[in-house]
Amino acid sequence: MPSSTHDGRPLTARDPFAPSRPPSAAPREPRRPLREPLPLHHPDTGVPLAHVWAAAPGTYGDYIPSTAGERRRLATFRRERDRRLYVTARALLRTALSRCVPEVAPTEWCFTVGPHGRPEPAGPPTVPRLRFSIAHVPDLAVCLVCPELDCGIDVETLDRSVDPARVARAMFHPRESAQVSTAPLAERGTLFLRHWTLKEAYGKARGLGFLLPSDSYAFALGPSGPPRLATTADDDGTRWQFEQWSQGARHVVAVAVRRGDGPDVQVVRHAGPP
């Protein structure tokens, strides 16, 4: 299954992708945006907007990693498909952030990571502060950007070879395991992946990944309405919002946003990469 870090990198105390700039460098004149920024709040209601993009490997075929850290990371991949996926995920993240703040070029974003590997923008500073999450499978990368709020995204391939009932018994809450095990055989794989992607997105949004025991909470998936966090030992499920959808015919995507006491977030799914 996907790695426990948010963008496939090993856990590290500092961000290896941050560009190195001399401390004495003179500040640059503000760049005039080439296009209008995407809104981060609805212009009429003020509710936060969470933007989601997807990109297949090769989308950014001419992208060359602009930092020494990215180039070092790229050099560690031996298979060409892994190299293309890494380049796609990094370019997707940088261009997504710049689509929301066009005055910052994609190559100018700096990143840091939390104690458990959760990546965050480290600069340039923006108002509001941007939050993001990325995920990928071998043939697709997805990226979520929203203002201020804890957020997570995950994607899985629907035709993955896995024993859903066995893995659910080992890793899911008993309520979820029972739901998967008693589902019609033809539906078990999809139901398992729906639970799995929700758990991945939720763990990322909390900044814990697999450090959050996956059997300590349960999602409720009904025939209508969005998924909800129904059982949890250390969190308030009413403060979270979850959405899930099929991305084409082969993938399922899940999004988690901690909206707290605020209104529901509007998730905007873009047709193509930024």
Image (cartoon, rainbow, N blue to C red):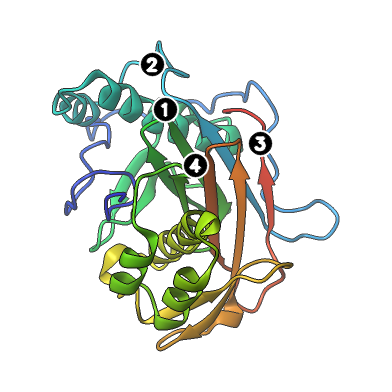
Q: CA distance from mark 2 to mark 4?
A: 17 Å
Q: Say if 160 sits above or below 78 in the image.
A: below
Taking the spot 34% from the left edge, 57% from the top edge, the residue there is: 163
Q: Which residue is mark 3?
A: 270
**Nearer-N-terminus badge (1/2):** 2
Q: Quadrant of residue 77?
A: top left
Q: Which residue is disc 4 drawn over?
A: 143
- Foreground: disc 1 or disc 3: 3
Residue lying at the far front of the rendered structure? 185
The reply, left or right, for residue 163 in relation to residue 77 is right
Q: Residues within 10 Å of mark 1 (few under 14, many from 20)?
A: many
Secondary structure of residue under mark 4: strand
Q: Are marks 1 and 2 in contact (CB under 8 Å)?
A: yes
Q: Residue 159 location in percent, x, y?
A: 45, 41
> How many C-alpha atoms fall within 10 Å of the one at disc 3: few (<14), some, or many (≥20)?
few
Q: Position of residue 142 (x, y in %)?
A: 49, 40
Report the Cα–Cα distance between label 4 and label 3: 10 Å
Q: What is the secondary structure assignment of the residue under circle 3?
A: loop
Q: Residue type at mark 2?
A: Tyr
Q: Relative to 146, does residue 231 appear above or below in the rendering?
A: below
Marks 1/3: CA–CA distance: 16 Å
> Relative to 66, is 117 above or below?
below
Of mark 1 and mark 3, the one earlier in the sequence is: 1
What's the distance in space between the residues labelled 2 and 3, CA to CA?
21 Å
